[in-house]
Amino acid sequence: MAQGPSSEHARLIRKLETIAVLSDMERTALAGLPLRLKPFVENSDLTREGEAPTECCLIVEGLVCRYKLLGAGQRQIMSLHLPGDIPDLQSLHLGVMDHSMGSLTAGRAAYVPHAAVRDLSDRFPNLTAALWRDSLIDASVTREWLCGIGRRSAHQRIAHLICEVFVRSRALHLIEEKTFEFSITQAELGDALGLSTVHVNRVLQDLRADALITWRGKSILVLDWPRLRTAGDFDPAYLHLLGGAAF
Amino acid sequence: MAQGPSSEHARLIRKLETIAVLSDMERTALAGLPLRLKPFVENSDLTREGEAPTECCLIVEGLVCRYKLLGAGQRQIMSLHLPGDIPDLQSLHLGVMDHSMGSLTAGRAAYVPHAAVRDLSDRFPNLTAALWRDSLIDASVTREWLCGIGRRSAHQRIAHLICEVFVRSRALHLIEEKTFEFSITQAELGDALGLSTVHVNRVLQDLRADALITWRGKSILVLDWPRLRTAGDFDPAYLHLLGGAAF
DNA sequence: CGTGTTATTGACCAACATCAAACTTAGTGG
DNA sequence: CCACTAAGTTTGATGTTGGTCAATAACACG
């Protein structure tokens, strides 16, 4: 039983440790969660609005979003999820999905039966707190997006989102230097920020012209963090990461 | 000890019963929560961003919002709260407030020490679930607002918000007939929906001209619910109310 | 009544959307 | 290694929603 956790479990543990302090026993318990691994391809739905999942979905690899389709056929992306996230944790307490969840890249998910999570939660109140905290931070991020779409300019919004993904990726140790992977198309950025593809494109050109970022293929290089942060009116407090605003 | 719950406790219980099934024991336990009553005046802050509350705040009477002030001095209102809501339930698990909370009208709040909530939660797992569920629904509402601001027109957004407050008020038995109280100014509506005061005013005139609503003083009369619902692209599923989409 | 807040109007303007086309890039199969 | 294709990016021209500014009117309250 001295086996270390699998890389999938490790992702989950690493994620939770960015927002909560875990004991050895809790880490061991997490490492014992039954996971059903399943790869997904690009642009596929992991869950659809109206469904009632019986498992939670842990992202192990890839970029995932939650979204809604509105009347006029438009899409609003409401959140982005990196490896270690459990985007549909809410299904534990809300029977029916009020939105869909889809992949932006290919990747792998690990499914955990609700029963297993409940069992864990019964045995470790501190893990209940950690998971609850995770869902509260998720809500906090949504609120920050709401502010951005409601009151910030397109330039600020895009800079802000890049800052967010940068900081979150960094907390998960997914970054080398100032470069991080962000495999999102301009159309998807628009769906996330309430902008048209064309406008996203123009703003990105400005950000590059201002020497704030470089965007090569699927990865972004942050050229000037302080100015990018200012341009996005970004303050990481809303991410509630342990270790505070290390930036 | 055969005392019925106070009217303040009753508000809380009624609210929780719109989203979860409670046992007699749980209701009794809730009715025993220590409440520190405190009235508030119009336009006052109940909590400010950056603070670390040690109590949760139950709204007993009045209209309350959560908001952030952004760099350029603009305000974004992120949620509205009716009697029975606990807008800062999150403070239980997120130390520092990432936003402020203020009153839009005068009213009364009841403060519950975090310790009392934790104790309740330890003794009644089902209440933990109910409170967690409440915070998840709060997040769901925020996501719906996000969609609105991101992708819906000003007309749709305003109609949608009126629908939401109508349905939520009704679930809390705060409504007579088709009239409900909604003491919000046009400037505040703008702050909630990411619109300017002037534009809110013009859209409201359209809605009245279309005979969808009447807005007299502090109360709204819904003249044509089906058409209002359509105009707002409103589907109450995201509210996750028990009793389903009774509308 | 006076005073301050809220609602309403009008004129003008800017940010961003829409439409349509061309250009790049990354894969794919031969 | 070279077409061929589809997805994604870029560009230009044009339109519209909704913002800003500024003034007036309507209330509410002491």
Image: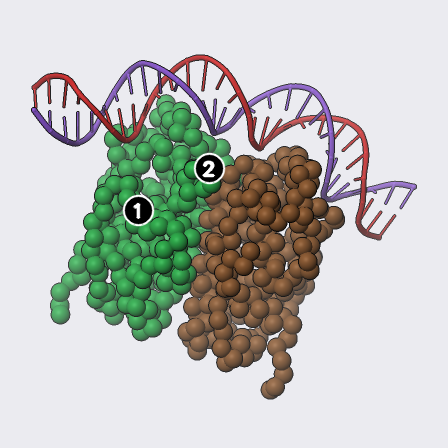
Chain colours: A green, B brown, C purple, D red
Q: Helix, strand or loop at disc 2?
A: loop
Camera-side mark, 1 or 2:
2
B49 left or right of A64 in image: right
Question: Dot 1: within a 10 Å radius of its alpha carbon, few (fewer than 14), some, or many (20 or more) residues?
Answer: some
Residue A103 on image: x %, y %? 29, 44
How far apart marks 1 and 2 lie (CA) works out to 20 Å
What amino acid type should be assigned to the residue bearing mark 2?
Answer: Ala
Query: Relative to residue B34, is residue A83 depicted above or below?
Result: above
Q: Earlier in the sequence, mark 1 or mark 2?
A: 1
Visible in this render: residue B219? yes
- The front one of B49 and A161 is A161
Indicate which disc residue A72 carries.
2
Residue B32 on image: x %, y %? 56, 78
Figure quadrant of residue B153: top right
Residue B97 on image: x %, y %? 49, 55
Q: Residue furthest bottom?
A: B1
Which quarter of the rendered picture does the C terminus of chain B lie within?
A: bottom right
Look at 37% across and 43% down and name the residue there. Answer: A164
Indicate which disc residue A73 carries.
none
Q: Helix, strand or loop at disc 1?
A: strand
